[in-house]
Amino acid sequence: MPELPEVETRVKQLRSPCINRKITEVHLGWPRHIHTPSPVEFKQRIIGQQIKQLNRRGKFLIFTLEAEFLIIHL
């Protein structure tokens, strides 16, 4: 498990290359972790969206997209 300093470092490393990029592909390694919407609908909603911001709250990465938020726990 990464500690907060490592998470902050990762956010800083990812922010510049991610901002204003479009999501073109989604791979769900554990589809059962996506409950609502369904994994298929999740992919449809995320693909094609542009990443507007990347922030951190604790060990959560918060990607602000055009019309959604994508939250990932590290």
Image (cartoon, rainbow, N blue to C red):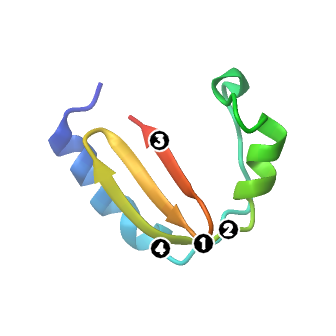
| Residue 42 quadrant | top right
- Select label 3 or label 4 by which is in front: 3
- Select label 3 or label 1 by which is in front: 1
Is residue 50 placed above or below 68 in the rendered structure?
below
Tell me which numbered mark, 2 or 4, is placed earlier along the sequence: 4
**Mark 1 sits on what residue?**
66
- Select label 2 or label 4 by which is in front: 2
- Asked whether disc 2 touches disc 3, contact meaning CB atoms under 8 Å apart, the reply is no
Q: Disc 3 marks which amino acid? A: Ile
Q: Disc 1 marks which amino acid? A: Glu
x%, y% of residue 9? 23, 52
> CA–CA distance between discs 3 and 1?
17 Å
Q: Which residue lies furthest to the front in this view?
A: 36
Tell me which numbered mark, 3 or 4, is placed earlier along the sequence: 4
**Circle 1 residues within 10 Å: few <14, some 14–19, many ≥20:** some
- Asked whether disc 3 touches disc 1, contact meaning CB atoms under 8 Å apart, the reply is no
**Mark 2 sits on what residue?**
49
**Mark 4 sits on what residue?**
19
- Asked whether disc 1 touches disc 2, contact meaning CB atoms under 8 Å apart, the reply is yes
Q: Disc 4 marks which amino acid? A: Ile
Residue 71 as seen in the image, left or right of residue 11? right
x%, y% of residue 36? 70, 34
**Circle 3 residues within 10 Å: few <14, some 14–19, many ≥20:** few
| Residue 40 quadrant | top right
**Circle 4 residues within 10 Å: few <14, some 14–19, many ≥20:** some
Q: Which residue lies furthest to the top in this view?
A: 32
- Asked whether disc 1 touches disc 4, contact meaning CB atoms under 8 Å apart, the reply is no
